[in-house]
Amino acid sequence: MESSDQPTCVDPYIASFEESLSARNYKPATLNNYRCLLRRFGRLLDAEGVAPSALTPDLAVEVGQRLPATPKSQVKIPNLARLFVTHLIEIGVATRPPLTPAQAERADLLGDFETYLVRQRGLSPRTIYHVLRFADRFLDHRFGENRLDLPALNAQDIAAFMEYLVTRKRPFRDKTPATHLRSFFQYLFAQGLTTTNLSLCVPRAHKPWGARLPRYLSPDEVEAVVASVRHNPRRGARDYAMLLLMARLGLRAPEIIAIQLDDIDWRAGELMVRGKGQQHDRLPIPPDVGEAISEYLREDRSSATTRALFVTHRAPNRPFKDSQVINAILKEAFAATGVKPPTPYVGSHVLRHSLATNMVRAGASLEEIGDLLRHRSRATTMIYAKLDTDGLRSIAQPWPVAEVAR
């Protein structure tokens, strides 16, 4: 039987790999676990005659998938193998596989499209990420690994892709796919890459404005949900500060993810909010929100490689790639407190709607609500007017009753 102490082909590179991870806040226990898994990976490479210099990310994943995972292991060996090969490429042991002509052509197209979105459209990095993602998914759905034939695109291709999106297990619930695809096809037509403006063929999402009342929680329910996350021993301080920002200031989830350490002016007691459309606003920080952020910075946040305020709990403690983490935190909070979500889909906007709704019922004017929520249009704030029961009652007309004949 082969000894586990026998050197493997990956042993010379494990030390430098651990150093790179340690600089990114990986804990010693995690590094020890990675070392054991990588040596198992190395023994399999030795058995199959694969040298580390011949590894590619795809090959590493393929080999890693043949290693059985232990029942208690939370680390997926293929993912670790891919991370290790990335390190080998960075230190010059392995080489990055060249792009195929089809991959290079698509990368050039999406790169030019990204430049256009930045310079001509002025979109935020978060929006650009999603626009590029849907454009890439459409190209992958239509052309696969083949070369692009953009002049051959037609309305049937768009309809087939949209049908694919809405018939999946978890279909999209909003209008973003159509909006992002429309931007992509407008760009293709403007650059002369398509013969017709296919953006006109993208179906519009049926989403009647103001068709129903905003869904919200009562003040007691809001406090219960926010307070429940505070007792989490691993990340309670972070989650509590994030939810409190939404409950007190009505911040959107992407705005919370975008907060930087430099956005907080402790002397003035103000927070700069990076809102939609690259709009920056300054809001006063309530005392309880300031205390929650301060506690998180003192006791929980450990990243030294990013200026983002909120970072992942696990190493390398990087910024969140999107705001879905807040939806997950809310789901856990609803389950822990027994509070029933106002909608089947638990979204972060429920706290923003709850703040505005409870302000209306406490007598706040629509102007005050619009200023706090930073609405650009008065029409957006008007959806909360339907919740002003007393105000609506004062202007309600009497029910028409036919005059009784004498």
Image (cartoon, rainbow, N blue to C red):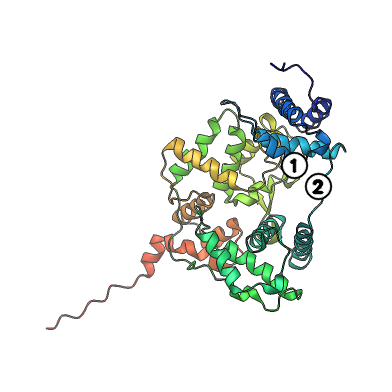
Label 2 neighbour load within 10 Å: few <14, some 14-19, many 20+:
few
In this rendering, would 367 be left or right of 80? Answer: left
Asked if 173 appears above or below 401 in the picture, the reply is: above
Q: Nearer the viewer, residue 213 or 371?
A: 213
Q: Is residue 289 visible?
A: yes
Which type of secondary structure does the marked residue at label 2 adopt? loop
Dot 1: element: helix
Q: Residue at x 68, y 34 (%)?
A: 64
Which of the two residues, 241 or 239, is positioned nearer the viewer here? 239
Vertical position of residue 87 compared to residue 192: above or below? above
**Rendering coords of residue 158 (x, y %):** 59, 69
Q: What whole-number distance in Å separates the C-alpha atoms at marks 1 and 2?
A: 9 Å
Identify the disc placed on residue 379.
none
| Mark 1: few/some/many CA within 10 Å (<14, 14-19, 20+) | some
**Mark 1 touching mark 2, by CB under 8 A?**
yes
Type of amino acid under label 2: Pro
The dot on residue 57 is 1
Query: Which residue corresponds to the image point at 47% horizontal and 68% vertical from the top-left?
Result: 208
Residue 115 appears left or right of 280: right
Mark 2 = which residue? 97
> Which quadrant of the structure image shows residue 281?
bottom right
Quadrant including the C terminus:
bottom left
> Which residue is outermost to the bottom?
406
For the N terminus, which image quadrant? top right
- First reached walking from the N terminus: tag 1 or tag 2: 1
Q: Position of residue 392 (x, y in %)?
A: 39, 65
Residue 353: x %, y % from top left: 50, 54
